[in-house]
Amino acid sequence: MKTIAIIPARGGSKRLPNKNVLLLDGIPLLAHSILYAQANNTIIDEVYVSTNDENIKEIALEYGAKIINRPENLSGDFEPTITAVKHVLEVIGKEVSNVVLLQATNPLRPKNLLNEAFDAYQKSNSDSLFTVSRSHHKLGKIVVDKFVPYNYFFGQRSQDLEPLYYENGLLYISKATTILNEILLSENAIPFEVNHIFANVDIDTQDDFDYASFLINKNKNK
């Protein structure tokens, strides 16, 4: 049963230019996910980076990942992740059972996360797993200039909120056959709860990048 990691990392980011190659704690942003995959080599057999960018290719090779040249028609701003991941499987043409999707924009992950998540995935009857975190926000909608609470009532304590969760993007696991059917997460996908400060990091802006750097430095001092 071969399990591979796929890291989509196209060039041309708009809000934070060249974000995948910016140095975070002394190494490129992309490298954090490559190294995380390599550190879990009891689970992951090979690490692939899908990209259309020459600088990203050089970094991926430098850090020991294999390169999949992503066509420009799969590299647009609005192209869904599933097309890049499926393309990798089609190109390598190897027998793959499971795919671990790591997003370069989520560079910080708890050390034991993949071990624990993969164990839960294998014990389940699901075709997919994805990580979630609990939201502790009081959410609502604005309707005709009026705020309408969604998950609470005015005056309710935060600790009494109904549990709601958000997809944090730390990692995804799916059967290769599911991805080849152009499905990233199956209908029976199981959520894996991660309530860790790293789940708050998803880098799209300079502020996000600075926050990730702050967390790294903070955890070094522990």
Image (spheres, rainbow, N blue to C red):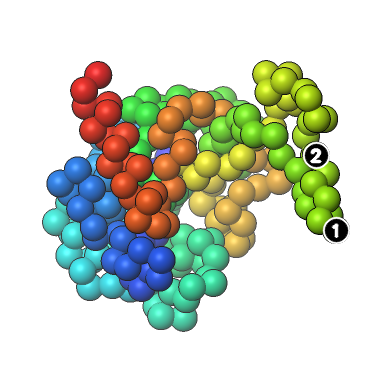
The amino acid type of the residue labelled 1 equals: Val
Q: Say which element carries label 1.
A: loop
Q: Residue at x 51, y 61 (%)?
A: 81
**Which badge, 1 or 2, comes first in the chain's sequence?**
1
Density class for disc 1 (Cα within 10 Å; few <14, some 14-19, many ≥20) is few
Q: Nearer the viewer, residue 193 or 68?
A: 193
Q: Say which element carries label 2.
A: strand
Q: In the rendered image, which residue does mark 2 sit on?
A: 149
Numbered label attached to residue 45: none
Name which quarter of the figure residue 69 lies in: bottom left
The amino acid type of the residue labelled 2 equals: Pro
Q: In the rendered image, which residue does mark 1 sit on?
A: 144
Circles 1 and 2: CB atoms closer than 8 Å: no
Q: Nearer the viewer, residue 222 or 30?
A: 222
Q: Position of residue 206 (x, y in %)?
A: 35, 56
- Against 93, residue 171 (above or below) is above
Distance CA(mark 1)–CA(mark 2): 14 Å
Image quadrant occupied by the C terminus: top left
